[in-house]
Image (cartoon, rainbow, N blue to C red):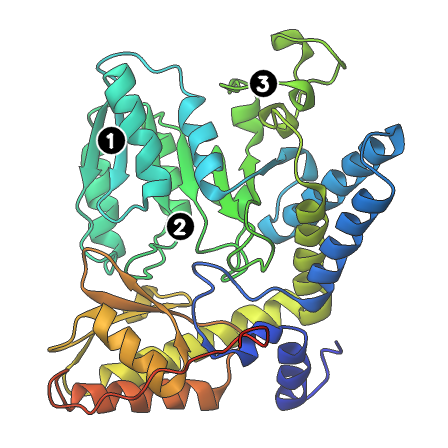
Amino acid sequence: MSPFLPDDVKIRALRDELPATGAGIYLNAGTCGPMPRESARAMAEVAERELTVGRAHLAAYEELLVRMDETRGALAAVLTTSVDRVALMGSTTEGMSVAIWAIDWREGDRAVTTSHEHPGLMGSLAMVRDRRGVIVDTVDIGDGDDDDRTLAAIESALLRRPRLLAFSHVLWSTGAVLPARRLVELAHAHGVPVAIDGAQAAGAIPVEADLIGAEFYATSGQKWLLGPEGTGALAVSERALSWAEPTFAGFFSTATPYAAGREALWADARRFEPAGFHKPSVAALARSVGWLSMHVGLPWAYERAARLASETAERLSRIPGVRLVTPRPNMGTLVTFRIAGWTPEVALDELGRRIFLIARPIPGMAAIRLSVGCWNTEDEIGRVVDAVAELARHTPETLPRHPSLTVIDAGER
């Protein structure tokens, strides 16, 4: 796709390659992004070959290794790191688990995190708490709207000499972009390694893992990178590779086939890949990331998504009865808000009926989250804003409900 195409032409071509954008107003890439046609084709081609030719011959194994290499390379380009520092994962959650369990925890050790973390991060911290007696300090950073407050709160916790700082680059709840590099520098000044959850960052905003400097940076393949579910990555810094050891190891973790033990592990990030992967999904993830990087163009995608998200936040903030949760100065591509008098579930149901909105609620915050992507249009944003304004003028009791759309399968009688 030429970078010189007018935006309206480029958007039409882009959306044609993302068929799910025609199923509704697609504002939920923070859960799963729309998959490109060519990624689905790549997945189908590999699956068909496995069905008709088989998977048990040596060539199939060698092809898997090639596919894994391609995918690491594509991910390294997006994460702005070296390919030898990228390990393939099944999700951000798996990557954060690998990072957290790389610490040789002892009873009474401390870990520091923030008050807005996803269960994908908190789950593993809870396990080291419950199984190893680790103290988890959860720091209140408000909505992530004030970098100075965030830095001061984290530094106070770092004075208690934790063994790990773990936080999200972009908060999944409020959409705030945390000052990742400054937090890493602060942690390192106290001798503390860092693991970052980048699920809502990679593919949505520019990520420079090497510049950020965290020991571990995990991300998902199915969200902003538009790949299949069950895919992800973990970028491991050169510093961490000098000491971090995997909790799990297997055939794919070792440079020496059929060997086991520390001396057999890969010297690079591949040591954290204990097992093989679903080849169709690996092929599709490489295709999605490559499509974003080379066909769409990441700088263009970042700029457009950021601009649309900022416009969405601005317009929503001007609606009486709507409270914007996402901090404007610190925002990326997520827009979180509340509508007075409406629960997010009821509001989303009504918005789905009226404008076919695809979005999600944020549990515990009574809020709605929109994930704005480069594939969205100004017209879609306008329709969302107008529909939210209509809800805000009413209550669930006073607004006439729209009928739901019933999809009848062609096979039904």
Determine whether, in the image, residue 314 is placed left or right of residue 249: left
The total number of labels drawn is 3
Q: Amino acid at mark 2?
A: His
Q: Which residue position holds label 3?
A: 249
Instruction: Say the numbered circle drawn on residue 169.
Output: 2
Q: Amino acid at mark 3?
A: Ala
At mark 1, the secondary structure is: helix
Q: Quadrant of residue 127?
A: top left
Instruction: Say the numbered circle drawn on residue 158.
Output: 1
Q: Quadrant of the N terminus?
A: bottom right
Alpha carbon separation for disc pair 1 and 2: 18 Å
At mark 2, the secondary structure is: loop
Q: Earlier in the sequence, mark 3 or mark 1?
A: 1
Alpha carbon separation for disc pair 2 and 3: 28 Å
Q: Is residue 49 visible?
A: yes
Which one is nearer the viewer's eye here, 298 or 63?
63
Q: Nearer the viewer, mark 1 or mark 2?
A: 2
Q: Earlier in the sequence, mark 1 or mark 2?
A: 1
